[in-house]
Image (tube, rainbow, N blue to C red):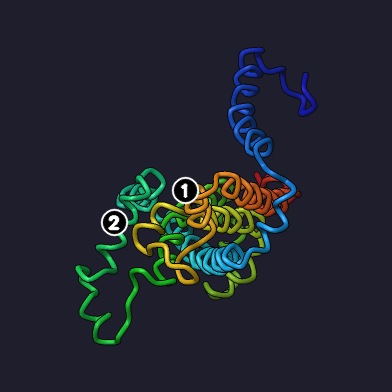
Amino acid sequence: MNRNGGTRFPATVGLLALVAGLSTLFPLLSLVRGTQWASLPALASAPENLTAAALSLATASLACILSTVLGCALALVLARATSPLVAVLRALVLVPLVLPPVVSGLALVLAYGRQSLLSPLFETVGVQVVFTTSAVVLAQTFVSLPFVVLTLESAFRARGFAEERVAATLGARPMRVLHTVTLPRFAGPLLIAATLAFARSLGEFGATLTVAGSLAGTTRTLPLQIYLAREADLSHAVGLSILLVAFSLIVVSLAYARGPLNGEGEER
């Protein structure tokens, strides 16, 4: 019996779990092994690296907010709607998960570039999207939104909306139900969804490079800075990579510190 009162896993399951863990851990340990630790302080304080890191944090934070707000609304619709079209909408929303990054970037270029249907509007108001910081945020939001939708829709479906129905029966308006019942109930999943969106945005590379380019101080995020460093000095790229891994690990660990649902027990 295991500590949860269930039967033991078969040895094959344990072996496969070990292989799965090592397949993730071994490359990360190799990265640690290849790091020149003495040069990390100078590397972390280099002006070009600080600029890239600051841009990454700013754009990833904005993309995280956009993805969480939009993804929460969409997940609520997907969890509660009964239309057959819901399955089609869900598939479309999740497509960025499986698209090659360059395809995502090309889609964004065609959506917001000179060939876009919105191009006349952009020209009228004097706005350029492609190859700007806004394009970085759009790319990060595009690839991180599916993580929010998946996380929250699963949580919404698992717990249901019984308390929301009770509140509505008592006369609470929909917006009040959302603010006082739904959001507090799902604070844990919301935190995890936002964390995943932030982490995914922070690591975004391919779509960003395609739609925003690599302009220092404008679109060159930390992953792009790492890529450029790899071309010039592999040790610098490894050092920047280990800093990004460490930061991402801290962020994700804090979100999961109290369990997968922020310490809340399962609701029946």
Q: Is residue 45 above or below residue 10?
A: below
In the image, 148 versus 46, the foreground residue is 46
**Residue 48 appears at what percent x and percent y?**
57, 65
| Left or right of residue 117: residue 265 | right
Which residue is found at the position 54% from the left and 75% from the top? 173
Quadrant hosting residue 179: bottom right
Q: Quadrant of residue 197?
A: bottom right
Q: Amino acid at mark 1?
A: Glu
Q: Is residue 34 left or right of residue 201?
A: right
Q: Who's the residue at 64% across and 17% down the image?
A: 15
Image side of residue 126 versus residue 257, left or right? left
Give coordinates of residue 119: x percent, y percent. Answer: 23, 75
| Disc 2 element | helix
Residue corresponding to mark 2? 106
How many C-alpha atoms fall within 10 Å of the one at disc 1: few (<14), some, or many (≥20)?
few
In the image, what residue occupies the spot 63% across and 38% down?
Answer: 31
Which label was assigned to residue 231?
Answer: 1
Residue 168 in sight: no
| 268 with respect to 124 (left or right) | right
Residue 37 in percent (x, y) is at 73, 46
Looking at the image, do the residues carrying marks 2 and 1 touch, with CB atoms under 8 Å apart? no
Give the amino acid type for the residue marked by disc 2 in the picture.
Leu
Is label 1 in a helix, a strand or a loop?
A: helix
| Residue found at the very far top of the displayed protein | 11
Q: Residue furthest bottom?
A: 125
Q: Nearer the viewer, residue 139 or 98?
A: 139
Q: In what quadrant of the picture does the C terminus appear?
A: top right
In this view, the residue farthest toward the front is: 232
Q: CA distance from mark 2 to mark 1?
A: 24 Å
**Quarter of the N terminus within the rendering:** top right
